[in-house]
Amino acid sequence: MFLRLVADSFTRRPRRKIISMAALAMGMGVATAALSVSLDVGDRLAKEFRSLGANLLVTPQADSLPLEIGGVDYRPANAGAYLPEADLGKLKTIFWRFNIMAFSPILEVPAQAAKDASGSSPEKITLVGTWNHHSVPIPDGTSYVTGIDQTNPWWTVEGKWFTEGADECVAGVAFARRLGLKIGDTLAVSAQGSSDAHPLKIVGLLSTGGPEDNGVVSSLPVAQQLAGQPGMYRRLYVSALTKPEDSFARKDPKSMTPAEFDTWYCTPYISSIALQISEELKGTDVRVIRRVAEGEGNVLSRVRLLLWLVTGAALLAAALAVGASAAASVIERRTEIGLMKALGANSGLVGVLLAAEQLLLAIVGGSIGFGVGILLARVLGQRIFGFAPEPRFFVLLIVLALAALITLLGSAYPLRQASRYDPAPILRGE
């Protein structure tokens, strides 16, 4: 009987029901779109941000002296110790190994170079040795291909990058301009103070906007040979996929409880990944490149905040629309409510009946809104963020729960007033 009364009441006054369902569908559609996009936008944007380059710098601990001013790290990384290249495969064994997207070692060598067979006096330069499409053996028996083009994607090359294991190099554009170098020329490169020249064929012209424009970049073995440091490097750039830092991430790990430390360690914060890298690469100091890391976190936080503000506004508008519709419906049904009470229905039964009707309205409106929101999420995701989020079942459950909550909150006051009606004045027409 109760369900029949609810169904009968729901099918009457279709115009007002349609208005309420439209308001709910609109609010739930926006909520569905925002929730669907927000669930994927973090990972998607974080991967896009990897095009900004490395966000971690690894240097020997022996020559890293603490010097931080205003939150900016000014420690030098240009003298002293070296690190073994053979340990770099361990980067893919840390807890967040799949979040290590790329890494490349750097060895800078003071050198002198001249155009081969030109007879000109050699010019002092810095030769940078690094990896390019280098296959790194991992301790589990697999391998991983990485290099400088992935950690420093803003380095642009006219021509092509050098080939691993070949006597090739890319010359900085400023250096090439001074010596009149072009692709295909050969450089005679030697360590400063040495007469043993190493011929390197120029296969590309490098533009970085940095000191590399006045030098030469070649494969790491070439730099190791010139420096007399086989199998060693000086700096390591790491590009890691991370979660934006929050107040918890900024806590000092030493002050955390064991439970807090486990949570922090098992979350891909840039600080926790840095700690894990330092644990695997012994004798290293891992620094966060703050400008990159904080820039990523700020953008992601603002995008999410914008999505939640839009969702909140849509839900508030839906609640007001449902409340107004419920108030108008209660006023129209005063006689019906008075008759129900005169026939013996108490205030609680009247309130439950009207609330059940509103919940049925919420389920229908929320389901329609979910379908609309999925379409909206795919359009917005594709056009703004370049991806189309997939529908998730738990999002439907969240949306239906939100629809029920918004409906009950919006219609709470009208339903309370209806349950308090005195049937006698109503039936007398007062």
Image (cartoon, rainbow, N blue to C red):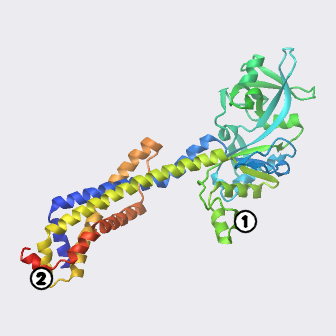
Q: Residue at x 70, y 54 (%)?
A: 274
Considering only order in the chain, which callout, 2 or 1, is on the residue closer to the N terminus? 1
Q: Is residue 45 above or below residue 11?
A: above
Q: In the image, residue 142 lies at what x, y percent?
A: 70, 51
- Find numbered disc 2 in the image and state the secondary structure of the residue it sits on: helix
Q: In the image, residue 93 lies at what x, y percent?
A: 71, 56
37 horizontally vs 366: left or right: right
256 horizontally vs 14: left or right: right
Residue that numbered label 2 is attached to: 342
Q: Amino acid at mark 1?
A: Lys
Asked if residue 128 shows in the view, the reply is: yes
Q: Residue at x 58, y 44 (%)?
A: 49
Which sits in the foreground, 366 or 333?
333
Q: Is residue 416 above or below residue 111?
A: below
Q: In the image, residue 424 lies at what x, y percent?
A: 10, 80
Q: Residue at x 85, y 48 (%)?
A: 63
Mark on residue 254?
Answer: 1
Image quarter (top left, top right, bottom left or bottom right) of the C terminus: bottom left
Q: Residue at x 61, y 44 (%)?
A: 50
Residue 348's image quarter?
bottom left
Image quarter (top left, top right, bottom left or bottom right) of the N terminus: bottom left
Q: Amino acid at mark 2?
A: Ala
Which sits in the foreground, 265 or 409?
409
Which sits in the foreground, 255 or 157?
255
175 horizontally vs 20: left or right: right
Q: In the image, residue 268 lies at what x, y percent?
A: 62, 57
- Find numbered disc 1 in the image and state the secondary structure of the residue it sits on: helix
